[in-house]
Image (tube, coloured by chain):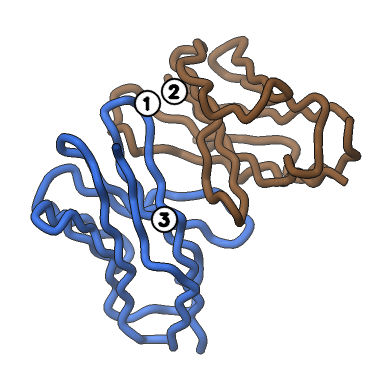
Amino acid sequence: GNSVTQMEGPVTLSEEAFLTINCTYTATGYPSLFWYVQYPGEGLQLLLKATKADDKGSNKGFEATYRKETTSFHLEKGSVQVSDSAVYFCALGTSYDKVIFGPGTSLSVIP
Amino acid sequence: DAGVIQSPRHEVTEMGQEVTLRCKPISGHDYLFWYRQTMMRGLELLIYFNNNVPIDDSGMPEDRFSAKMPNASFSTLKIQPSEPRDSAVYFCASRLASANTGELFFGEGSRLTVL
């Protein structure tokens, strides 16, 4: 079946550090992949997406590349800010209208 | 354009009471989803609608939960009777049929506390 696995948090980084949040997936067919972000007290927001193998999604300095050979979609940012503190969800779009979300990874960035 | 609007933002009630959560999707969106978020179980899909018709309610935990979508601009999630284990944040999300499956727009959620 379809599933998404993310690295467990919480992750704590100093401002300007490099961020990687690992995400791997299991799926039949060729799903689209997504990263969502949830700031405290808010709903989830789509951060970036990739719809086919080798696509790179990017937004607000975040990037993730769809790697079919390793079934991965790791989120990266070169220099994090305090304002990036949030929970990040990796997600997989199925062909059955449903989205499979990972468990979320909490990121705290300290000045 | 307004986003997905949910009400109430916070609800505190006592066990056994009826709870009704409301959602207004983005105008023109064809799909509406109800999710529940807890620390223990993460984000769970409860039910979703396409063009106001319930398509999959397999995530609804028990018969105490019911959801309706009487028109394209309004949906409710009802819990009757409520129990302390129903305490969670409930999110509504909507999507265009023409968009990718994963391109959801979420509301800010309704935080439910059942005492």
Tell me the element at label 2: strand
Give the left or right position of residue A6, taking residue B48 as reference: left
The residues bearing labels 2 and 3 have C-alpha atoms spaced at a distance of 21 Å
Q: Residues within 10 Å of mark 1 (few under 14, many from 20)?
A: some
Residue B84 drawn above or below residue B70: below
Give the left or right position of residue B50, taking residue B112 as reference: left
> Which chain is home to disc 2?
B
Q: Are marks 2 and 1 in contact (CB under 8 Å)?
A: yes
- Tell which chain the image draws in blue: A
The amino acid sitting under disc 3 is Phe
Q: Which residue is mark 1?
A: B96
Q: Are marks 1 and 3 in contact (CB under 8 Å)?
A: no
> Which chain is home to disc 3?
A
Q: Residues within 10 Å of mark 3 (few under 14, many from 20)?
A: many
The residues bearing labels 1 and 3 have C-alpha atoms spaced at a distance of 21 Å
Residue in view at x 69 percent, y 20 percent:
B63
Tell me the element at label 3: strand
Image colour for chain B is brown
Residue A87 is situated, as x and y percent measured from the top left of the image, at: 49, 62
Q: Which residue is mark 3?
A: A89
Quick one: label 2 or label 1, which is nearer the N terminus?
2
Residue B97 is situated, as x and y percent measured from the top left of the image, at: 34, 22
Q: Residue furthest front?
A: A1
| Residue A6 figure quarter | bottom left
Which mark is in front, 2 or 1? Answer: 2
Establish whether labels 1 and 3 are both on one chain. no
Residue B49 is situated, as x and y percent measured from the top left of the image, at: 49, 19
Residue in view at x 80 percent, y 30 percent:
B19
Residue A42 drawn above or below residue B63: below
As drawn, the label of residue B31 is: 2
